Image: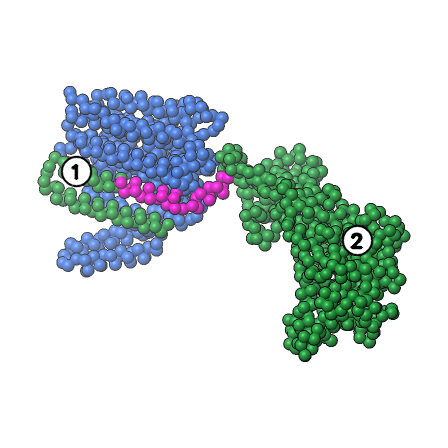
Amino acid sequence: MIENKIDWLTIALYAVILLFGWLNIYAACYDESHSAVLDLTTKHGKQLLWIGVSLLLAVLMTHVQPSIYSSMAYLIYMVILALLIVTLFVGAVIKGGQSWIDFGFFKFQPSEFAKFATALAVAKYISSLDNENDYSNIRNKVIVWMLILIPALLILLQHDTGSALVFASFLLPLYRHGMSGRILLLGLAAILLFVVALLVNRFIIVGVLAAIGLIYLFVWLSKRTRKHYVWVTSLFLLCSAFTFSVDFVFENVLESHQRDRIYVLLGKTQDTRGTGYNVYQSKIAIGSGGFMGKGFLNGTITKADFVPEQETDFIFCTVGEEWGFVGCTVVLLLYLALLLRVVRLAERQRSRFSRFYGYAVASILFFHLFINVGMVLGLVPVIGIPLPFFSYGGSSLMAFTILLFIFLRLDQARTELV
Amino acid sequence: MHFRQFDEQSIELLVVETIIAAGGERLCARETMSSDLYQERSNVIRIIFLVVAVIFIARLAVMQIFDSSYKEKADQQALRTITQYPARGLIYDRNGKLLVYNEAVYDLMVIPKMTKRLDTALFCSVVGISRSEFDQRMMKACRFSSYSPSIFMKQVSKEEYATWQSHLYKFHGFYVQQRTLRVYEKPIAAHVLGYVGEVDDNDISADSTYYRQGDYIGKSGLEKSYEEVLRGTKGKRIMHVDVHNREIGPYLNGSLDTMAVEGGNLYTTIDATLQEYAESLMANKRGCIVAIEPATGEVLTLASAPSYDPNLLVGRIRGKNYFQLASDPSKPLFNRALQAQYPPGSIFKVAQAMTALNLGVITPGQGFPCDKSLVGCHNHPSARSVREAIKMSCNPYFYYTYRRIIQQGKFKSIYQDSPYGLTVWDDYMHRFGFGTRLPIDLPNVKSGRIPDTAFYNRHYGKERWAFSTIYSNSIGQGEVEVVPLQMANLACIVANRGYYNTPHLVRFYGPDSARNEEYYKRHETGIRPDYFDIAAGGMYDVVHVAGGTARRANIPDIDICGKTGTAQNSGDDHSVFICFAPKDKPKIAVAVYVENARGGGGYWAAPIASLIVEKYIRGEVTRKDVENMYRTAAPCQKLPLPVRNKRKKK
């Protein structure tokens, strides 16, 4: 058996992000009367405990038989599904979401672990197909999407929209493994149209769409076939219908706080005390950091509880305020390096299982980064999901650690797994 | 922000293009059937990661580097600057007696957002206000700001504060801020000391780096002219407050905090005893007394009547009292010594005599007949010299003298000769400090008026006037106007035999005992001192020799020299007197002006001036009967004055 070296570069990036994250949690919760580093009554003290547990898990993940991940994938998936269902019945409700199973000393959040479980299951299914083109088979597609959407739906039932949305990140590994790029484009176009439809009069949009269609048909194309007419017309009708349904979806499907968050983001409502308060304060905290930041433990906004959730979902504010543009850029570049490294590792896998899983790891991390940082910068509506390895929270840190280190183990065994 | 949107849009376009390109490739790749059909797509995913990172970094750059509004907002909500008000400087008299000091008062402050669960009834009963008053004050505070402190109750006295101090902890959101109020040791020298009041918009815009709404500033008198010395330097403490507006601690450990530096003291030239005495003599009268030490120009007394107790314009009672004083027809707020522009009357003749002598148009032995057909006069023998003319205050004599100054015969036409003479005369008058603002260290001093050729050209037309038009100036009537300070300065010039130091009220100020060098410069009239000996002699005779116009000013054992004036105006004549004493090495020069006091300069102003001189030189007044009589007398014509046409003395 040929054992490759584990990828120490990824581990180093992980460690640096973890350490810097903890420093910022320490700063966000800093209180002079509890400045001791190891004080389990404080959040930074607890986080240190979770870091310890996570490191143990990392060691564990990298020392089990690599083939076990492939063979146990469905089992793990089923266990997590069961846990998600159990949570629906016995879950503790915290901040509107019923996502926690309370063990007293520790609140366990199954939805965090559903991500790597789903990644394993989908990777397993994709790798079990005879060849790559089998993804184009309708039956296979349905099964893959069932695997993804069932946990997402269960999480949605827990009122944890953010965590449910994370499952959209499977689009990227699927795309890498044969899903049509048009789905990505369509998704992007739908989001754009959705936003535009909220801001601009719908009849203007339909008019513009019609104009684009006509220009495409009669100016752009030199030869027109019957097929062209059918496609453009149906696309136009689809877009128009979508545009007109936006209002309905917005008013009837989304919850009121979600509507408010989107309106605040789009600048349709100026509400710096109610719905917009968090983002308003987080932007002030980050913006006031300036180029070099105010210095460690010197943040005036984060230190004075102006930003709610500042050690969890809004932890990036602390970076912005105390470490400034330089600190934020370093953190973002660390994440970028980690993501690109994981993609590179994924590309060198021989087994489709490992490669798909690697891409799932990168995509899940990326999705969290995109939504979380986008949110605190006021670019994305408020969706409460943690910043990987950074935000305070035991479940998320452990789940992300497991997610990453399973992949490192698979990568280490890349020559034996085919 | 436009920049950012553009940036994101263009980046999104890039993503779309990349994805389109990758989607197209898929079709080609399908044909090849290699083991990994979609390897190229890894680049699309990498580019997505990269693009998002670039968008975020660009956004951060805009927020953290280019847009400073976040920093301002952050400081605004997380930092609270607490101003440390310095104690205002003290004011002393020339003998080290304290005139003005400070007393602690307390402003009750409120932060409306923090007054949750307030026991309003208890609060009202403790502080001593009604419920409706409470609501009113609270509304006003809320309108200013719910989150920042505003004054709920102004200037609570130490005694009042002591009664509810122990309850204050029950009222969350209320706290006191210590301020100081001026206290005037004695109810004197109101016009000199001035008063302090809250800044208005003009004050703030004039020095917006120092003043904030609610600050105090000297509004008049020395309080105003030495504001920058007296006010001191404000200190500040910057506190870090949390989201609930609770103080967390000093910001940056207080490294940006500054201590208040208390204001500098003023050591004035005023003699508090003399000032008080002067004010007592001016009781029930309108007018003023100015006393100056001739050798230095130090103002010993500057009393304007009617006056008021400066303590009336302090603190919460100020508004009501100010309104009352401002609407009083006798104008107690008006500082007559500096701002009343009176006809000087006959005291002006001294300056005319000196000018004519120095120009050589008359000699000391010059005589002129007392020809009442030219200008009215009282019954006295014709003057045979300048000295006698001053003693008897002969109007025709100075008519002749002034004619020689104005019409010197340099031009054939009197219409050309008079403007020439007037220009020469103007120059001399200005050397005496007339027609110009004496730069005393008090605000709003008036210049008086010495008419010049431009003035008469404007009124009568060019070359349409001559000596005959303007001769009233010779006896201090006509177009001439003088402020009492200039009259006292004239007495100083004679006392000094030809020069003066600008009258001033502050010897030195501040911790370094700074002084204004301007006040140590001599202003020479350029007239020979021996001519002033003649004037002094004439002024000695006014008091001491039979036929003098102010025999009532005689003080046993003190050689006082004076000159009376009786200034005509729309009401009863003003009574004027200037004097200095002793004749040699004078210690004090005085001008007294009593408005609309029938009886002339010799009757009212001269005895009052002599009492001032005696009080200052001897330390006490021996003529108790005179003192009592003038203290209690109320000679001034009642206001409002009857409307009468202005007339000139014939």
Residue A212 shows in this picture: yes
Residue A323 on the magenta span: no
- Provide the major secondary structure of the magenta segment: helix
Q: Residue at x 65, y 73 (%)?
A: B458
Foreground residue among A16 and B30: A16
Q: Residue at x 74, y 64 (%)?
A: B354
If the image is split into quadrants, where does the C terminus of chain B sit? bottom right
Foreground residue among A93 and B456: B456
Q: Chain of mark 1?
A: B
Q: Position of residue B145 (x, y in %)?
A: 55, 46
Q: Which residue is mark 2?
A: B584
**Residue extent of the magenta highlight:** B50-79
Q: Colour of chain B?
A: green
Q: Quadrant of residue A38?
A: top left
Q: Position of residue B580 (x, y in %)?
A: 79, 55
Decide: is A283 above or below B366: above
Tally of numbered tags: 2
Q: Position of residue B306 (x, y in %)?
A: 77, 55
Q: Which residue is mark 1?
A: B39
- B637 displayed left or right of A13: right
| Marks 1 and 2 belong to one chain | yes
Q: Quadrant of residue B599?
A: bottom right
- B521 displayed left or right of B238: right
Foreground residue among B304 and A95: B304
- A389 displayed left or right of B294: left
Q: Earlier in the sequence, mark 1 or mark 2?
A: 1
